[in-house]
Image (cartoon, rainbow, N blue to C red):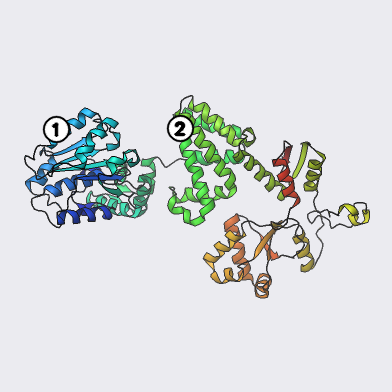
Amino acid sequence: MYRVLYRKWRPTGFADVIGQSHVTSTLKNEIKSGRISHAYLFTGSRGTGKTTCAKILAKAVNCLNLTDGEPCGKCENCIGISKGSIMDVVEMDAASNNSVNNIREVLDEVMFTPSEAKFRVYIIDEVHMLSTGAFNALLKTLEEPPSHVVFILATTEVHKLPATILSRCQRFDFNRIAPEDIADRLQYIATEENVTLDRNAAMLIAAVADGAMRDALSILDRCIGLSENIDSAVVREATGLAGRDYLFTLADAIKNEDVPLAINTVNELHKASKSMSRLCEELTEHFRTLMLLRTMKKSADSLILMSPEELEKARVQAESISLTQIVYCIDVLQMSLEKMFKGGNNKIEFETCMIKLCNPKLTADIGAMLTRIEKLERVVRSGGAVQTVSAISENASSVNNAANTEGRSHSPKSDSGNSKANNTAKPNVRNASPTVEDKQDRSERLSANAVFMEQWEDVLETLNTHTKTTATVFQNTTAYIAGKYVLIDVSDERALQKLREDPRTIEKIRAAIKEVTGKDYKLGPYKKGTAVQTNAAPKAKIDEFIEHISNSDIKVTIEE
């Protein structure tokens, strides 16, 4: 019968264990020095080698020809333990043998000396599944067992073990195996199996396995069933990573508040037998990807499980959705998933979740309110019109009118009657007709309607990765956006000269801006003292307006 790869290639010695050198080196030194503990506890996530190391340890303590702390694998004890014919080594699954009676049977055997081996070894897997009574029955023997007995406990959920058990064991924590180590092992095994596995495919399998060697070998088994020449495309097909465009579609529907598109997509996936709870988990993972790309930029690539094409698509989508909305979507999706596990109709629950995400105003929590306020702020700062439907007070109306007024000079209350001053206010630059003007005039006019560029620090960081010299010249500067221009506030004459006369510097800065924002901007110097809206302002009109509507029941409509 065919043996699956994770059984066929299970390590037979400590040297073959991948990625757990901190465990294997300690165990080997203890065995060489004869300092064998009476109880060991192996903890860690699935597929990291806990049970494998337990079996190797059982062979090592009973080996007749021990070599540098490693079992020889050839003596009668090693062969008998590998075949399961030596009754002195007992492997017990606590998930199905978790009662007091099961443990009492073990304790009755403990007092008998080994019949063939040096030690009686009891390997108790998934030990956290034992009942409270079983743990209590095991306590005394675990603390002071006979000298010929070794207990090896293994668990994936160490937090469920009583403190009295933990204190009686020598604990070893197994780490998730690094993707590079998994990929190296997979390529070695593929070569031995006469299969071609390229490096990108091996790394993709390692990423999907999430640090578990056993899972990686199972995926490799599936890939071999599809083709003996394994590349990234074969891995994506075998693992179901291909054809996940629906996640991007749902995210776009949420961003654009397109309820029909979201519901129709969910309905099509439901007809195709897609689990709604699994879809909710996948969409949550997708927004987590967008969150990492939004906050960590290039350094997030190693934390994301995607093909290069999907990653680039996700990077573009992340720039189009605000971080506030992304975090809000993750919160709502996780709450919806929790409700699914409590019962009810999963399809209805997920449809309701999608409608909430597409219409934040339906939810009264803080996350939805922040999402709405952020969108409102973005629209107003970009020049959109905000009109009140109903006002709570005259003050709310006056603040709203101030936010809608564009390019108008605001005089103090004592000068409100001076019509001449109002008539001579500078007109809106967007309504001005294109006439011939010098650079100084244009700089002043653009600066008058400029808004602070919040992504400028990201631009400088990106610029630093391409040219440290230029980035150094423009460090400690700020920038403002005025239409199709990015105006840079520079005080250094050298930087100002480069900004005006050096085409190479201009192109490098424009390229960095496009990489961060996805848009092409022209460059210019910022004329100080003329900005209407900056973060440095004590209390800009738009901030007063947003603060006011966030603390009242005022209703607004947004025209973009």
Dot 2: within a 10 Å radius of its alpha carbon, few (fewer than 14), some, or many (20 or more) residues?
some
The alpha-carbon separation of the residues under discs 1 and 2 comes to 46 Å
Quadrant including the C terminus: top right
Front one among 420 and 157: 157
Task: Look at mark 2 in the image and give the residue it sits on.
Answer: 277
What percent of the width, then of the height, locates residue 118?
9, 45
Dot 1: within a 10 Å radius of its alpha carbon, few (fewer than 14), some, or many (20 or more) residues?
few
- Above or below for 63 versus 264: below
Question: Residue at horizontal 52%, vertical 55%?
Answer: 297
| Residue 69 in sight here | no
Q: Is 428 placed left or right of 226 in the picture?
A: right
Q: Quadrant of residue 375?
A: top right
Task: Look at mark 1 in the image and give the residue it sits on.
Answer: 108
Front one among 343 and 37: 37
Quadrant including the N terminus: top left
Q: Which mark identifies residue 134?
A: none
Q: Is 415 placed left or right of 79 in the picture?
A: right
Question: Residue at horizontal 27%, vertical 45%?
Answer: 42
Residue type of the residue flagged with mark 1: Asp
What percent of the width, then of the height, locates residue 200?
37, 53
Residue type of the residue flagged with mark 2: Ser
What percent of the width, then of the height, locates residue 548?
73, 43
